[in-house]
Amino acid sequence: MSCDSAATLLSLLDGLTSSNADLRRSAEGTLAERETLPGFQTTLCRLAVDPSQSVPMRQLSLTIVKRNVRSRWTELTVDEQNEVRSVLAEDLFEPNSTVRKLVHACAAQCAAQTSLQGWEPVLDRVVQTMQDPTAQGERRSICFDMLQVFQDEAGPEVAGHLLHLEGSLRALAMDTNIPLVARWKALDLFSTSAAIVAEQATSKAQRNELAVGMLKGWLPVVEGMARSGDVLAVLAAVRAVSKLLQRLGSAMKPMLEAVMEPVCEFIRGGQVQYVNLVVNSEEGGIDEEEDGGPTTLLVQFCELLSSVVSKAKLRPIVKGKTAAILELLAPYCQVTESQMAEWSDDPATFLANEDDDFAALTVRLSAEGMAAEMIESFSSEAFKAIIDVATGLVTAGAASTANPYSWKKTEVGLLMTGWACEAINHHGEQKKPIGQVDNLVKVAAGIVGQEDSPPFLRLRGLALLAKICEYMKASFTADCYTILQHSLEAMQAKNHICLRLIATRAFCKYLKICAPQRPEECNALLLSGGGFQSIGSLMNWSGEGLADESMHLCIEALTSITRYSPKSIVAVGDDFLGLTMSLWDRAAMDPLVHLQVLDLLSCACGVDRSLLGKVSSTVTPKIRQCLSNPDEYESHTVGSSIELLSILLKRSSVPYPEDMWLCVQQLLSLCLHTTDAPLIQNACDTLLYVVRRAPMGQLEQAKTRVLSTLERLLDANELDDSAAMFAGPLITCVVERMGSALGPQFMQAMLQRLLAARAQHLVQSLLVVFARLAHANPVGVVDTMAGFSVPLEGKAATGLEALMAMWCVTAPKVAARDSRTILFTALIKLIDSRAPALLGVRTRTPLPVRLIEVLTAGLEYEVKRDRQRSHVRGATLLNDNGHMGGSEDDDEEDDEEEISEEDAYNEILGQLEDYAGDSDSEDDMDEEDEEIRDPLLEGVVLKMAILEAFRRWEAESHPWFAECPAEVKERLSKAIPKAVQQLKESGGQA
């Protein structure tokens, strides 16, 4: 660049920060052109390290340098690369900390581009500076900061080079003439490097060699830090052992054993100070430094113990000491005054900590994670230890009544009891009460009923009782109603918001338990106890960050009441609908809340006919408004409105009321205009109820639009496969109820959509429609399809030829039980019909033979799937009885039984659809039972139907069956005996 390039560059950089957009764009363009010129990067670097320039200008320059080093390094000449490296290396100790951090980042990026080549001498000098006893503390600190940046950004080569400087770093860590902070930072730096190198190691021998070196040289260093009495040095020791354990495993056992005792002693010695300065202080406690503090140490220690417990060879170090470890950590798990203040101001943070959901790490959460690992690894000892320590804490809290903070011990005891909730509930299911747990339950039950108890103690009792509700149901059945009462009282607006949130959760749990046993009392309690008012008040809580959580809890509570205590909902129907519609409106931007409200309204509509009428009259205006102006609403809001309409159409009596029928008309209009695939899918599902249930008089009013909707669904140029995904069931219903309105052109349109479809689900869905038509009139379908032509693979083919080609290719791959049954039994119908047009179909293999082959493949598939399911059931039984399932000897070696990736995918689809077909929700059972009745499926076992067809054709000497080649007959001779045997074993008739 020219001699005035620095001034020009400054002008361009100044232009980048201009408020004038045109000037900024011009500067960006010119700068982009100059970046490729020789010498540009060096000039920019020199400008960046020039102390006479302003700090913002230097920051901007270094930011561009870092970007260009990453993206343009290989474009630079070797001389310019060396110049850039030299300029950055000279400014590593830049006085301005903001600029210095960017210099370090640029240098690290430069080192990363060359795999550290050329930077080794720089790192060596930095380590020498760190070792110099006369070096100023600030200069030594800069060295550590720079090496940390290099470790993070310059690649694993940095760690490898620092490992070569092991002697220097170890000497630094052990030199008592150097401040302790530099010594523990040296340990931190080297342990991180060792962990990185261990992770990069390609063999166990390399890791073992590294482990030996670590133990030989650094074990005394780590132990010395652990015994130093300085919280940051102890933290460095714990962090080093954690990193090395994670990478080098049980080889680090001696180092772990060396630090356990001094670290535990340090933690024990800090209990009183921590309780006084952190737990019970209203001033905020001990401030954590940038490098950590007591809380960080405790979190790291819990994580170290979790890692130890998870490794079988290290487990003996802590086994037998679980109770002692829990007692050690218990004082630190107490809720602090600052936490309570924070949670009172921001209840959403409280819930995040309570649910361990994206919460910042705390001692309580880390200790809970550690306890979970202990329960997983040695359940009996861990469970006993948790209950013993919890009992001791509760007893100590009750005994120290003079201390205003003594309740925190009780709170921790109840918290720890909740850590073992799964084991406690398991004991309840086994009808095996536990004396100590019973005592803790009585304490918790007593606390939740005391309105003068501290709110965070009271909520802890409710949280515990909610977690162990199964144990309570089994062992304290008579007391569950009392807990329900206390939960309802705690939900009232006069109480602390955090208490109300936990009480709402407990209320939902115990209403489910109590309502079936004491329905009338629960109804009366809800109506007299202010439950609905409490929910309404909670729903309107305006605290920052809590709106979503409060809505979820309110919906959960209302749904529980609707499901388990419906009479109370009917009694306050207007208030209930007011709350529900308020939730609906507030959730306009939240699809998840809309789904929850839909579930709530679905429950409500099934509770009582009068309530259904109120719901309908309340929501239909909202649905009508949304469907008439869909562009004014979020897509998920329109979708939820369609779902809500489907609930009403399913539940309401017919003929449909006028206001509901207007919604149907608007839904049909939406189907004719929108291209939003999810909306069309929802609409198809909703229109099913209209076509199935509406009287013909009403249906005639909508016939034109329904047929236009089908025409649009079948037009591949209009809608893609995802939009037409659920068209099949709707077409089937229309055919059943309005078949006379559908001519041959409809079947042609359906075939063209089938041929254009790429989504397997749509292909199968449309084929099933053709199969249903074939069941009703096989000869008529064959003749109609043979009467028109369509393009197929670039050639003209009859509709019948195209249909049979798709059918024969697709049917063997279909895994969904009902679809398979309909497709294959329809093929049997076609063969039985002996329709002459079938003989005229042009295929490589004569169509009659091809149909027999497809049925043979269908029988083989049924045999294989049943065998696989029996293996799964057998393995499950073995595992339930404590045996290992399967052995090499049990593996099948028949290549024909191997399942392909595509078959496996289809099998999963089939299982999902089977599950969907078999399962009914509690409140929809009667309606769903009515929907799934299908005359083509009732009493049909596909395997038996295929067997009977083959036997009949053989007995009748069916000419198509007789023409089968020997290969197909041989496959049949293998499949038929297996199918017969399976039917006998399952109790079916063979």
Image (tube, rainbow, N blue to C red):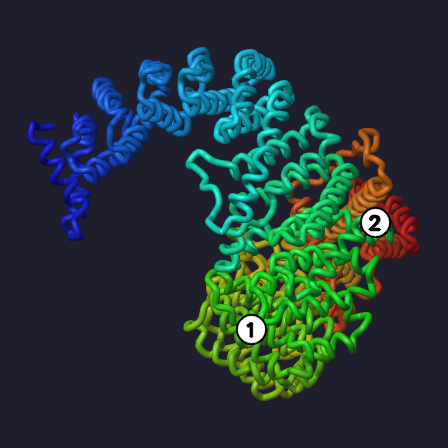
Q: Which residue shows up at 66% across the image and 87% down it?
A: 655
Q: What residue type is labelled 2?
A: Ile
Q: Where is residue 515 in the image (x, y as percent from the top left)?
A: 77, 71
**Quarter of the figure with residue 690:** bottom right
Horizontally, residue 423 falls left or right of residue 746, namely: right
> In the structure shown, which secondary structural element does the residue marked by tag 1 occupy?
helix
- Image height of 94 relative to 64, above or below: above
Residue on which disc 1 sits: 537
- Image height of 901 relative to 70, above or below: below
Residue on which disc 2 sits: 434
Q: Which of 57 and 667 is in front in this view?
A: 57
- Image height of 680 relative to 98, above or below: below
Residue 777 in view (yes/no)? no
Q: How far apart are marks 2 and 1 (CA)?
A: 39 Å
- Residue 214 tag number: none
Horizontally, residue 8 falls left or right of residue 188, namely: left
In the rendered image, the residue lying farthest to the front is 402
Q: Which amino acid does label 1 sit on?
A: Ser
Q: Which of 806 and 226 is in front in this view?
A: 226
Q: Which of 90 and 921 is in front in this view?
A: 90
> In the structure shown, which secondary structural element does the residue marked by tag 2 occupy?
loop
Q: Which of 45 and 115 is in front in this view?
A: 45
